[in-house]
Image: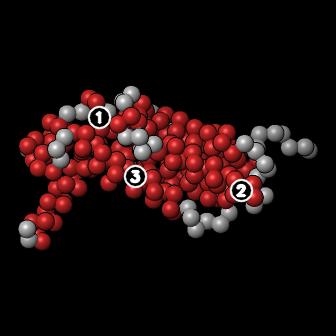
Amino acid sequence: MNKKRSAGRKNTRDKLLEKATEVFAQRGSQDTTIADIAKAANIAQGTIYVYFQSKDELLGECIQKIINPEIEAIIDATKGIKDTMDRLYEFFVLHVQLVQQKPHVARFLTVEARLNEEFYTTWPDYNPLKKYLTWVENLAEQAIQDKRIRPLDTKAFALLIVGVMDLVLSQWLSHPDALDIAKVAESVRDIIQHGTLHSAE
């Protein structure tokens, strides 16, 4: 196979993955057909089977090639931030940016597992919320060591942060004009930094 043809096949495959992710995000994988994806990609239905044997294989590739890299990129982008609380806030901001710039990726993250009861059984190694929970928990443990936050239950802290993020983004995806997620992210940062108790005057 010559280089030009190989590049063409890769471009077609990448386009299929991108369009499939969009359709899966909109309809859920259970309600998506190969015909739906072919229509979105503007190609013949049979062409999809040149690259993928089944819809399940295509879904798995969407996770591995499209979704996972986005998650890893967010986590990696915060590694150079020394202050643990600044790192946590940047994590929240980057996820907000992902939602705004690539809503189909964010919708896939928040919707697919809710619509498909067998999702985690089929893909046991894929759980972005679990990955986020582990990351925030480890960050909280480091923040305690650094004396940036008081000793607390890091698991509960991670559930609080990730739970808020997941709910906010889900609400925004459903009603984007009714929620300013950038403002919410800033408010979350303020609450994390200063708590909820009224300061003594």
Q: Quadrant of the N terminus?
A: bottom left
Residue marked by disc 3: 68
Q: Is residue 90 left or right of residue 117?
A: right
Residue marked by disc 2: 143
Looking at numbered disc 2 in the image, what kind of residue is underneath it?
A: Ala
Q: Nearer the viewer, residue 181 or 56?
A: 56
Looking at numbered disc 3 in the image, what kind of residue is underneath it?
A: Asn
Locate residue 195: give its quadrant. Answer: top right
Q: Quadrant of the C terminus?
A: top right
Would you say residue 136 is visible in this rendering? yes
Label 1 sits on a secondary structure element that is: helix
Residue marked by disc 1: 29
Looking at numbered disc 1 in the image, what kind of residue is underneath it?
A: Ser
Residue sitting at x 37%, y 50%: 67
Of the numbered discs 3 and 1, the one sitting upstream in the chain is 1
- Mark number displayed over residue 160: none
How many badges with numbers are in the image? 3
